Image: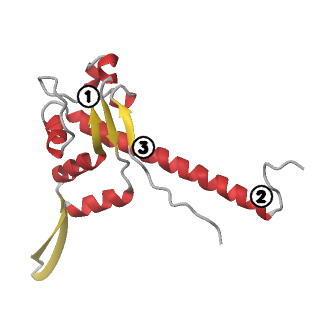
Amino acid sequence: MGIKFKLTPEPVWIKASDPLFDKSELGEFSKDERDKVSFLINPLTDEVYSELRERYTTEKVETVFVQGRRETQRTTQVDNDGLNEALIDYIVKDWKGVVDERERELPCTRENKLALVKRGYPMLGVAWIEASRMVMSQFEDFCRKYKEEQEKNLSNLQNGSGGDSKG
């Protein structure tokens, strides 16, 4: 019986000066200004995305007449605005350096995240989603490399080679 580790993606702090944010409205600020702001980004797993999408999807059942016959049609509709708001709320776990007009730190609440995106920084929401995808992609790369290394080590052990041992 082998030992396995359940690897789970962890949130990652990303500075607003990261190139990911260049195409957002933050790109208009100097690097020094952007260095003072950072976001704790949750990786978005397929499971979480599917759960959120399902929560914002409704099914409509209609009875229609087609060539004189009664048929039932099912259609699904996604509340994209609701889904995008839920994604932003999930992805941005915390932040540093986000201040109000009086230079007071703003708490990282759902309301404040959405206010930023809706009141002047719409591309910031897109950048947050891209940052989450990047974090998840890096985690998946790490897992793939970890698995390959474990398989190589197991193969070495099964073949009697101790790997790094010198004889």
- First in sequence, mark 2 or 3: give its number: 3
Q: CA distance from mark 2 to mark 1?
A: 49 Å
Q: Residue at x 18, y 34 (%)?
A: 106
Residue type (three-letter) at the residue carrying disc 1: Gly
Q: Is residue 70 above or below residue 86?
A: below
Specify the farthest residue to the bottom. Answer: 69
- First in sequence, mark 3 or 1: give its number: 1
Image mark for residue 135: 3
Image mark for residue 97: 1
| Residue 30 at x, y percent in the picture | 30, 16
Residue type (three-letter) at the residue carrying disc 2: Asn
Q: Is residue 84 left or right of residue 165?
A: left
| Category of crowding for the residue at label 2, using alpha-carbon neighbours closer than 10 angstroms: few (below 14), some (14–19), many (at least 20) | some
Q: Are marks 2 and 3 in contact (CB under 8 Å)?
A: no
Which callout, 2 or 1, points to the residue nearer the camera?
Answer: 1
Specify the farthest residue to the front. Answer: 104
Q: Is residue 1 left or right of residue 22?
A: right
| Of the pair 91 and 96, the residue shown nearer to us | 96
- First in sequence, mark 2 or 1: give its number: 1
Image mark for residue 156: 2
Q: CA distance from mark 2 to mark 3?
A: 32 Å
